[in-house]
Image (tube, coloured by chain):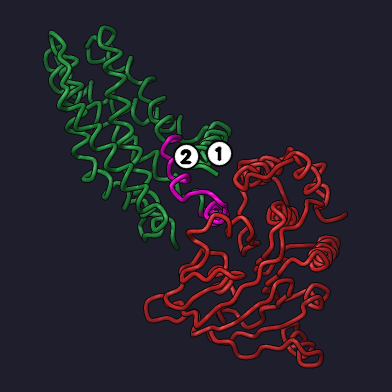
Amino acid sequence: MSAPHNAADPALGIAFQEIEKRYGDLFALRRVSLSIRPGEMVALVGANGSGKSTLLRVAAGLVRPSSGRIEFGTRSIAEGPYGSLALRRRIAMVGHSIMLYDALTAEENLSLFGQLHDLSGLPALIRDGLAAAGLAQRSSSLVRTFSRGMRQRLAIARALLSAPGLLLLDEPTTGLDVQGIAWFTDTLRRLRRGGCTIVMSTHGPSEALRLATRAVRLEAGRVAADSAKGAELTSMLDFQEN
Amino acid sequence: MNLARGARIILAKELRTEFRARELLSTTIVFVLLVIVLFSFTFDPTSAESRRFGPGLLWLAFLFAGSLMLQPSFLREQSNDTLASLRMAPIEPFAIFLGKIAANLFFMLLAELFLLPVFAVLYNVSIVPVFGSLTLVLFLGTLGVATVGTVLSAISVHARMRELMLPLLLLPALTPVLVASAEVTAGLMAQPPVLNTEGLLLLVIFDVVFLTAAWLVAEYLLEE
């Protein structure tokens, strides 16, 4: 299995500046400042409820921060990529949920998102994406008939369809079997080589985490540790695995 | 991507998923059919009474159908967080609404066109001579219901007791549409038929105002 071979979008860096997100009295993020360079692969680690998913959803433009600024490349915006269609085109996400329609087939799902992204050569992209995810034989099956692992592979294929410059992954290996994890790790490796910026929150597996060039640990919505150095990085990722 | 193309893609998705499941349309048609039949049996109206009260009953039934049909519009985007992927797509937020409004308008009109002959038979009113004007009223009135209902469906999806919330918000908000649509329909069913242009104008204004409002606040309505 191989990653889709559509030309990758130039890598997109992202910088969070004093980002806060409050839900009533509850702080999901507290003054998070974090700069991620184009082409970096950052592992977001931390306990449940530490703010990893919220930070990823802020980066995706799905959650508007209560305060702070976000910079994408050279573009500085206060509230995430809401207003910019050009930015949204370059960002993709695999979330906790699969973001796919159960009542559509695998092919129809990819076609829908490909059309929304106005991708050229869509039939070939879909064919390659499904083949890469090992779902070519099930392209005409409804997603509701898929196993958890197949759904997750399709979710990843959907995110990769637009060859994003910034890929946000929220526990992307959930439900994947050994073969699926191997495919995913291989896909990440290819994306890294292509220069894609990747921000991933995950509890495993080690193969995927080992690809990270940097680890950031969140605790109670704050950045508690940030390391790109060898031993410290390994220590943080080991801590995550344990 | 322009607004129309984004809306067309969303519309195609809505039509495909509904025609594949065939849950909403059939349920709504059966519901409205039951309401119309029960009203007819309960009141056993004369022809004159039908012309006077029938349009109001008809539009009330359509309104109830709307609250039933519009509820899942955004609710079903929640199960797999599909709304997030639509929001992340490089399309105008209003394109999501426009596609859904168009789909809801289509489904409701389909149900109404199916039920209109049943209403005409049960209530002994003639609709054939005024069918063109009646279609215009149905379109304008239903567009108002679909627009407000789709917007309120997006709002109520995050609320507790959301199944109750939509009808509670929808019915008062649509009072002007209900009154104007019923009055114009009553005029068309009168002997001789009269086209109430003021009522039609009110429907047009209502539709334009609420479509514009939806366009202006679409981005905020979709926020988590």
In this picture, residue B133 sits left or right of residue A136: left
Quarter of the image where one finds residue A38: bottom right
Tag 1: Cα neighbours inside 10 Å, few (<14), some, or many (≥20)? Answer: some
**Chain of the residue under the numbered disc 1 shown in the image:** B
Q: Nearer the viewer, residue A60 or A196?
A: A196
Q: Are marks 2 and 1 on the same chain?
A: yes
Labels 2 & 1 near each other (Cβ < 8 A): yes
* Residue in the image at 54% along x and 57% along y: B84
Give the dominant element type of the magenta stretch: helix, strand or loop. Answer: helix
Q: What residue span does the magenta drawing correspond to?
A: B78-103
* Residue in the image at 22% along x and 11% along y: B124
* Residue B92 among magenta residues: yes
Is residue A144 something one can see in this rendering? no
* Residue in the image at 26% along x and 16% along y: B133
Q: Nearer the viewer, residue B178 or B222?
A: B222
Amino acid type at mark 1 = Ile
Look at mark 1 in the image and give the residue it sits on.
Answer: B9
In this picture, residue A84 sits left or right of residue A5: left
Q: Is residue B8 above or below residue B154?
A: above
Q: Look at the numbered disc 1 and give the secondary structure of its residue.
A: helix
Specify the farthest residue to the right: A1
Amino acid type at mark 2 = Gly
Chain seen in red: A
The disc placed on residue B220 is: none
State how far apart marks 2 and 1 are (Cα): 7 Å
Look at mark 2 in the image and give the residue it sits on.
Answer: B99
Quarter of the image where one finds residue A42: bottom right
Q: Nearer the viewer, residue B27 or A222?
A: A222
Q: Look at the numbered disc 2 and give the secondary structure of its residue.
A: helix
* Residue A24 among magenta residues: no
Chain seen in green: B
